[in-house]
Image (cartoon, rainbow, N blue to C red):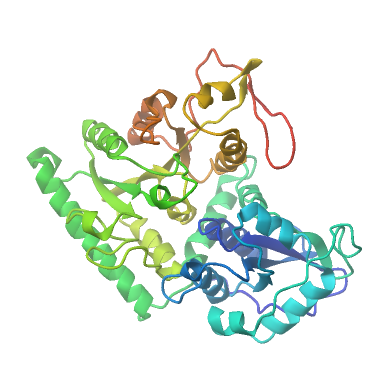
Amino acid sequence: MHRLARFSTRVPNGVKTAFLSLPGICTGDIWHTAAAHLLWTLEPRDPKVQFVTLLTVPEDASQSILEPGVGRVPAMYEYLTNLGLPCVVAKLPAAGPVDEEDCEQAAAMIGADQLDQLLTNQVNQRFPCFHTLWQSLSPVQLVSSTTKGVVGGSRNHLLPPVHHYAATTVLASYFREDMPLHVRKARGDLLRNGLPGNLSRDDPIFLEVMQKVQQLRSLICRARSSAGSSLEQARVVLFIYRLVGRSQRNMNPHQDASRDIFDQVRQAALRRGLVTIRVPHGVPAGEIQDDDLDLFDVRGGPDGVIKDKRFVACFWAQVCDMPEVFGAVGSRTGSLDIAAFVGLNCLEWDEPLLLEIEGKEYGAAWDSLRLSRQHLEKQVPQHLRLLTQSHLMSITVLAQASFDSLAGRYTRIDEENLDSWLAGGSNLMPHIPSDEKTVKILVYPFGRQCANHQ
């Protein structure tokens, strides 16, 4: 089993530190950052570069994301440090409501001297928990992006910090198609063993995981029994029933499931001799059913409880060893990414927001679906990120015609890809109709760059 060497701020001559930026509001991206950081640490693509995760959190961030036990930021920080991956926190000056791009722009304006200070004060002292660290921090001072030491780097650093989307690119580079299969498998094993945090079998987190595995086994028996005698030995499909976006101001319709999509998957699975179990995420406690696997939410308990990230990673790694589990299906979300990263057979759906097809403005068609241009421009790079993960999972798309503009949700996913996956297909890519031979994609926020899909 690989062990991570302790990080040192005293780097050998010629080695520079690159910062993987991670906005504190990007909960799902923690899995991409952790996977990329872990692989680079164990098998660096460039021995002259070492990674540190830079977690950026506004000074006036909502207490709901900072509170112990339910806040996402403490869980992200403590997950990385528990894995032995160096992480520093930058407290950004108060600026009111911010989004991930605001945090990225602020990260790019932290000078080399301040980054040095963050490294020295935080990594060397090894704070035991996020709140001890947070209370000791003062807001960083942001400088002009043209100031020397911010762009281009310094003697010790590569600057500015790398955009958090790049973690997905780094991760994908370890699973390129031109690499031998045994090499990709070995790297997959590194993720499967490393992302759960090397928990011992008497660790309370591991014991809780095994209780959840036993609950899943009981639910599988119940689902088989309910489906009839012909399915007594049926394998199970886990459906990530995510409703998180419904409660957010800027809802992302691609990330939320619906009863209609669940029924579609359940019926398609039955035709293939499989049964289906829901895994609620963001579902109000009162709506969780007895037949659901309450992995993320607790039936009868408070909404939105944040579990130790090692619990989630370890659970999915254990599920990989269950032959009765066929795989998991859900939207593009970190909740399912982590299952794929540790080796589970997964199918993720997304919105195929391709803005131009064969010279025709495709985005206009989405105007009738009440999706803003801003949503389109932010969604496209996210879809491209998902496509780069095709060696770790199967990918499909939502059916455009099924979008309910009044309800703000989709009711179906692509039938062809779903059936191919249920039939045993792997590493599937979205189906694009044959008459749409060339798709030009607007890439945001890196400018108007076109990519052709033949």
Q: Residue at x 72, y 83 (%)?
A: 121
Residue 194 falls left or right of residue 159: left
The percent position of residue 81, horizontal first and vertical second, equals 57, 75
Residue 201 showing in the rendered view: no
Query: Residue placed at 39% from the left, 44% from the top?
Result: 256
Q: Nearer the viewer, residue 211 or 4?
A: 211
Q: Residue furthest left?
A: 229
Viewer-side residue, 11 vs 102:
102
Image quadrant assignment for residue 259: top left
Looking at the picture, how far across and down is residue 107, in whole percent? Answer: 72, 62
24 above or below 233?
A: below
Q: Position of residue 409 (x, y in %)?
A: 38, 36
Q: Farthest residue to the bottom: give it.
A: 125
Query: Which residue of the protein is positioned furthest toward the top in this rendering?
Result: 435
Q: Is residue 427 visible?
A: yes
Where does residue 358 sit, x and y in percent of width and height?
A: 63, 15
From this viewpoint, which residue is outermost toward the right? 148
- Whether residue 403 sits left or right of residue 288 in the image: it is right
The tally of labels here is 0
Pick the quarter of the image with the C terminus: top right
Q: Classify residue 158 by image quadrant.
A: bottom right
Looking at this view, is 235 or 89 the one in front?
Answer: 89
Left or right position of 349 against 264: right
Quarter of the rendering containing residue 117: bottom right
